[in-house]
Amino acid sequence: MIQQLIRRYVEWLLGLFLIFSVAYIVVMFDGRVDQESIIEALNYSAQTVTTVGYGNWVPTRWNFEQDATLHQRVLFMKLLSVPFSLIGAFVFSVTIGMAILWILDRHR
């Protein structure tokens, strides 16, 4: 029973990673899918959904002086990050809690 719930919550986490990664690629890379955009999107998604937040850094080839819309896109991603962080924190903590319960139950 607990194992099925853990699996379901892990699926939710993976779904959040996928949705947020796609949103990040669409907003920040104009939908361009390449190695850099995928790595950046997965990294940003993992930081946001797990609420780790390693810091504010951007890809080196982004140029804020030449791209006038970059500040607006970054702000938009920050606005999207708030609900994803809250949902992700809940799902992530429930998953960890259930995994701990499952481990403790197996050792009884």
Image (cartoon, grey):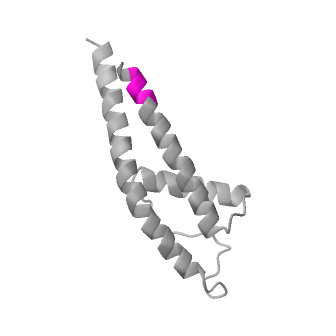
**Residue at (37%, 50%) from the top-left corner?**
87
Let me know if residue 56 appears in the view.
Answer: no
- Confirm whether the magenta stretch covers residue 75: no
- Taking the spot 42% from the left edge, 35% from the top edge, the residue there is 9
Q: Is residue 86 above or below residue 29?
A: above
Residue 52, by quadrant, is: bottom left
Q: Position of residue 26 (x, y in %)?
A: 63, 64
Q: Which of the two residues, 63 or 81, is positioned nearer the viewer here?
A: 81
Q: Is residue 16 visible?
A: yes
Q: Position of residue 71 (x, y in %)?
A: 54, 81
Looking at the picture, how far across and down is residue 104, in whole percent? 28, 20
User: Residue at 59% of width from left, 79% of height from top?
Assistant: 70
Up/down of 82 relative to 63, above or below? above
**Region in magenta:** 3-7
26 versus 65 height, above or below: above
Q: Quadrant of the C terminus?
A: top left
Q: Residue at x 35, y 54 (%)?
A: 86
Q: Which one is nearer the viewer's eye here, 55 or 71? A: 71
Q: Main secondary structure of the magenta part?
A: helix
